[in-house]
């Protein structure tokens, strides 16, 4: 009996030591928020080829809507999305002359002609409506979205994927969800497009292994970070300018799990969040490799929670980029 008690005590001590080691690793390996830009990332090109300085999210808004599109090696898929988005935005402007918009394509260090493709739209519609931010190095989707948001002019800021998986006209649905949130403390609110209503159909088409990974990821999101949001990963999210400034200023994760940290930050600041069903179609050419990407995201979820728990990461007050 004494021998058994000693084993139990040893296991408890080993478990406690393991937890301490993990917390130390999480704390020591935590990367700080870096909002510093390369000199080339501070400018966009006008139609005449001249450089102009990007504005700052800290400035007052001068457009009704900014659409931020992160793009990495998207020369083939992006034109379909941009055609749909610009057609919708132009038609809306014709129907509502007071409506103003901008599209910011953020080339996340692509190796193909993503920037050249985006610049064609800038020349077609003018740099006042379509701007291209080319990052010198690949930051990851979260880093690209953040840099685009910090360079935007809109009262509302929409994050939309370059593959066009979500029907762009569904912006009206997420706008309605945003408007329905009341009150909005300091005018901060977020409306998330959601594919949760499509989950049963997707389960029927997936292998048992991929279904297990999907539900496992949902559980980890709920357990470590975000409660009450069924689909944290849909790349169609609408922010008020104030909410974007508050959340993106604190964001640390720049790759696939950035959505989760963004919503975790929002919930910590008690920013109201709506979740709205949107039309979504799977587009070929995804950069997400199911097993390894979900493994990486699972690791990121754990470290997000641990790094805030150990205060290696802290919620930041909004500050300007350099």
Image (cartoon, rainbow, N blue to C red):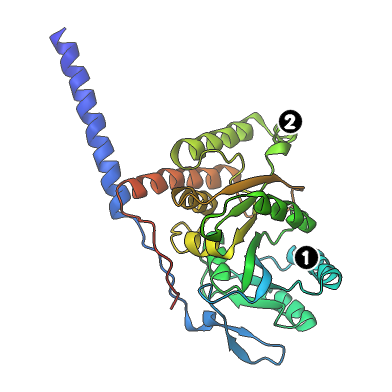
Alpha carbon distance from label 1 to label 2: 31 Å
Residue contact between numbered discs 1 and 2, judged by CB atoms under 8 Å: no
| Residue at the limit of the structure toward the front, as seen here | 183
User: Of the numbered discs in the image, which one, if any, rests on residue 85?
Assistant: 1
Q: Residue at x 69, y 70 (%)?
A: 64
- Determine whether, in the image, residue 42 is placed left or right of residue 33: right
Q: Mark yes or no: residue 70 visible.
A: no
How many labels were placed on the picture? 2
- Image quadrant where residue 67 sits: bottom right
- Determine whether, in the image, residue 145 is placed left or right of residue 119: left
Looking at the picture, tell me which residue is in the foreground, 71 or 125: 125
In this rendering, which labeled residue sits more in front, label 1 or label 2? Answer: 1
- Determine whether, in the image, residue 252 is placed left or right of residue 89: left
Up-down: is 28 above or below 227? Answer: below
Q: Residue at x 23, y 32 (%)?
A: 16
Percent across and percent down for residue 151 are 56, 74
What residue is pinned by disc 2?
204
Percent across and percent down for residue 130 are 71, 77
Question: Which mark sits nearer the N-terminus, 1 or 2?
Answer: 1
Percent across and percent down for residue 8 are 22, 18
The C terminus sits in image quarter: bottom left
Q: Mark yes or no: residue 2 visible.
A: yes
Identify the secondary structure beneath mark 1: helix
Q: Residue at x 67, y 91 (%)?
A: 49
Up-down: is 303 above or below 146? Answer: above
Percent across and percent down for residue 93 are 81, 72
Identify the secondary structure beneath mark 2: helix
Q: Residue at x 55, y 37 (%)?
A: 218
């Amino acid at each position: 009996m004494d021998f058994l008690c000693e084993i139990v005590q040893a296991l408890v001590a080993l478990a406690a030591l393991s937890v301490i080691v993990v917390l130390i690793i999480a704390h020591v390996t935590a990367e700080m928020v870096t909002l510093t830009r390369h000199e080339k990332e501070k400018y966009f090109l006008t139609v005449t080829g001249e450089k102009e300085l990007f504005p700052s999210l800290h400035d007052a808004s001068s457009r009704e809507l900014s659409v931020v599109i992160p793009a990495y090696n998207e020369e083939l898929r992006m034109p379909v999305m941009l055609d749909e988005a610009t057609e919708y935005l132009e038609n809306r402007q014709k129907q509502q002359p007071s409506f103003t918009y901008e599209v910011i394509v953020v080339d996340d260090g692509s190796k193909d002609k993503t920037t050249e493709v985006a610049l064609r739209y800038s020349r077609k519609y003018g740099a006042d409506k379509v701007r291209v931010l080319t990052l010198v190095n690949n930051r990851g989707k979260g880093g690209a979205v953040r840099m685009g948001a910090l360079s935007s002019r809109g009262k509302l800021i929409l994050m939309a994927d370059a593959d066009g998986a979500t029907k762009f006209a569904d912006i009206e649905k997420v706008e309605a969800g945003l408007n329905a949130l009341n009150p909005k403390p300091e005018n901060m609110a977020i409306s998330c497009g959601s594919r949760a209503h499509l989950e049963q159909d997707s389960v029927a088409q997936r292998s048992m292994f991929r279904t297990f990974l999907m539900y496992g990821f949902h559980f980890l999101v709920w357990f470590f970070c975000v409660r009450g949001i069924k689909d944290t990963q849909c790349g169609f999210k609408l922010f008020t300018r104030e909410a974007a400034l508050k959340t993106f200023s604190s964001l640390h994760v720049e790759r696939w799990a950035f959505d989760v940290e963004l919503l975790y930050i929002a919930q910590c600041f008690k920013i109201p969040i709506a979740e709205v069903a949107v039309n979504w179609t799977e587009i070929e050419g995804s950069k997400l490799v199911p097993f390894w990407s979900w493994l990486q995201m699972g690791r990121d979820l754990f470290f997000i929670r641990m790094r805030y728990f150990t205060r290696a990461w802290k919620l930041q007050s909004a500050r300007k980029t350099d």
